Image (cartoon, grey):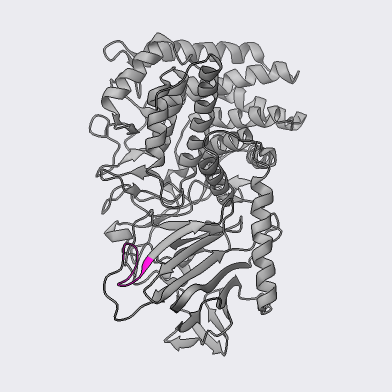
Amino acid sequence: MLPYPPIAEHGLIGDLQTCALVSSEGVLDWFCSPRFDSPSIFAGLLDHDRGGCFAITADAPGVEGGGPGGEAGVITRQLYLADTAVLITRFLTREGVGEVVDFMPVHHPTTVTDRHRVVRVMRTVRGSVRFALECRPRFDYGRAHHDLALDGSTARFEGPGVTAHLQAIGPVPLEADGGDVRAGVTLAAGERAAVVLTVCDSASQAPRPLDADELAEEFAAVRRFWHDWIGRCSYRGRWQQIVNRSAITLKLMTYAPTGAPIAAATMGLPEQEGGERNWDYRYTWIRDASLAVRAMRDLGFTEEANAFRGWLQQRLEDGGAPNGEPLQIMYRVDGDPYLAEEVLGHLAGWRGSAPVRAGNGAAGQLQLDIYGEAVFALAHAGQAGDVIGYDGWRRSAAVLDWLCDNWDRPDEGIWETRGGQKDFTYSRLMCWVALDRGVRQASALARPGDVPRWTAARDAVLQQIMTRGWSEERQAFVQHYGSTVLDASLLMMPLVGFITPKDPRWLSTLEAMDGELVSDSLVYRYDPAASPDGLQGSEGTFSLCSFLYVYALARAGRLEQARYAFDKMLTYANHVGLFAEEIGPSGEQLGNFPQAFTHLALITAAHALDTELDRFASRGQSVAP
């Protein structure tokens, strides 16, 4: 096994309450339970020695050669069963071809449970393959001791308040290895065996053992669940496969009991190898979640959009954030606003990228843009047919009243920099969005509100952006007032309707970004050298911005360039269609993985490209390949 495989060399499985990463070598090296934001059971991705892992690999001793992604003599390949979250890792050896099928059953996902199950099926499809298994849990981010009880085909790992039960189905002889378990099994063509890991509260009753028939039913049920769900997708455009994969990924990262999407499945994965930009993204950002819901609604998934709308309304009903604002920028998936950040100094970090942090200290920042994204999400949920009730409207109106008094304040901005508050143009842009959508909704829903005041504030924001957010020197909208720094977050301007996509000021801004932030169609968020962000090191291009760039190009009529940029971005997806946060200088994926922001922007870009290409074709024109 590679001690630290590339970030992108993983597939994602989950049950809509938590999830796991499985490397292309068959190593499950990230899993938290019972929720996305719970302490880890396996965190080998962040520390090979202390983090723990659950590996099933093909054993081919004494064979030289082989191929990428595996040990000597073993070539590995990984794929999803089409339109599902069932992951298959294939092992190609000189003796035969074997597969490990990984999935998490989805049972009553909206009911909170402490019990979560990972199923790993080993099967040989050609020749003969020997599988090697190691199960080495490390509870509480590798800080807690555990005890092992082994009894034939079952093993029990007792951690602090958490128990992991491992059951073998078929000829898998479990052996103790200190406090861990290992096994080896040789399967001929057509033979299969399985192991099932069930994690639950220590006070819960031990899981009932499954037999082979029940396991087959579990497999059929999880395939049926995902096929039925993605079958509701309304997208029928040119990029069906990658859009479906992005939709499934966003669904996998949504906590079904509350409808709250998380920003990413992981924590601590760096924006620069060996650097300090390593954050915990397993929480619900108002911004990310609101935009994700908009993308899901555009695909026809109104239930998901309305579930998040309910979660968001509950945050407003709870009476505001601890910092005194109506909303906090992020919460735990159950709405808990307390996300104290701690450094896990005992973890080495992915390839030495330290410190590893759990929790997120940015939760207390002031980021005024979140009110625009929140109102944006509520307005789109209403358009989806679930009109907000009177109480919900009253809470939304109160936010707009508050925003009228607070929009003209410096804040930390969308990128959560730690370099001090500034008058960020993007923050003002989204305040304009909140007020604009509020005015529109008051009319559309015939609801009471101080519409004249909201309208006056909306217009004041627009005029301020046009004067102070515009740089005559750069002939572009800039990151914050008084600067000449460009910022790719402003690619949202035409998307939210602040400016038309062919307005001269916008086309000039896009041209300026082309010359400074764009590198072979990949887009940097901003230049940290020109605008210090309070952190050491550098970062890669930001994939969210690269897809927003495609959107802007398409709407500006630069269709040939937009399509080329989109197709090139798709080449940076990993082998199963997943994206991390950033792309490094050599095309490697960096940052937490997979990232919701990137996948929602992919969906938005695909929609825009389809619309513009169809419009172009309706006039009898074509875009050069």
Quarter holding the C terminus is top left
Vertical relation: 129 (above or below) 87: below
Residue depicted at x 52% and y 26%: 608
The answer to whether 103 is drawn above or below residue 381 in the figure is below
Q: Residue 575: x and y, percent?
A: 42, 52
Residue 485 position within the rendered picture, expressed as x and y whole percent measured from the top left: 29, 24
Query: For residue 212, what is the image quadrant?
Result: bottom right
Q: Nearer the viewer, residue 604 or 538?
A: 604
Where 190 falls versus 29 (above or below)? below
Q: Where residue 291 sits in the image (x, y, percent)?
A: 54, 35
Residue 549 sits in quarter: top left
- Magenta residues: mostly which secondary structure? loop
Residue at 39%, 33% in the rendered image: 546
- Residue visible at 57% across and 35% down in the picture: 295
Up/down of 99 relative to 504, above or below: below
Q: Is residue 254 left or right of residue 564?
A: right
Residue 366 shown in magenta: no
Q: Is there any visible trace of residue 214 in the rendered image?
A: yes
Between 439 and 498, which is closer to the camera in this rendering? 498
Q: Residue 75, how many percent across, how many down?
A: 36, 66
Q: Residue at x 55, y 83 (%)?
A: 155
Q: Which residues are magenta?
A: 67-75
> In this image, 283 relative to 356: left or right?
right
Image quadrant occupied by the N terminus = bottom left
Nearest the viewer among 114 and 603 is 603
* Count of picture labels: 0
Residue that lies at the very extreme toward the bottom in this rendered image: 152
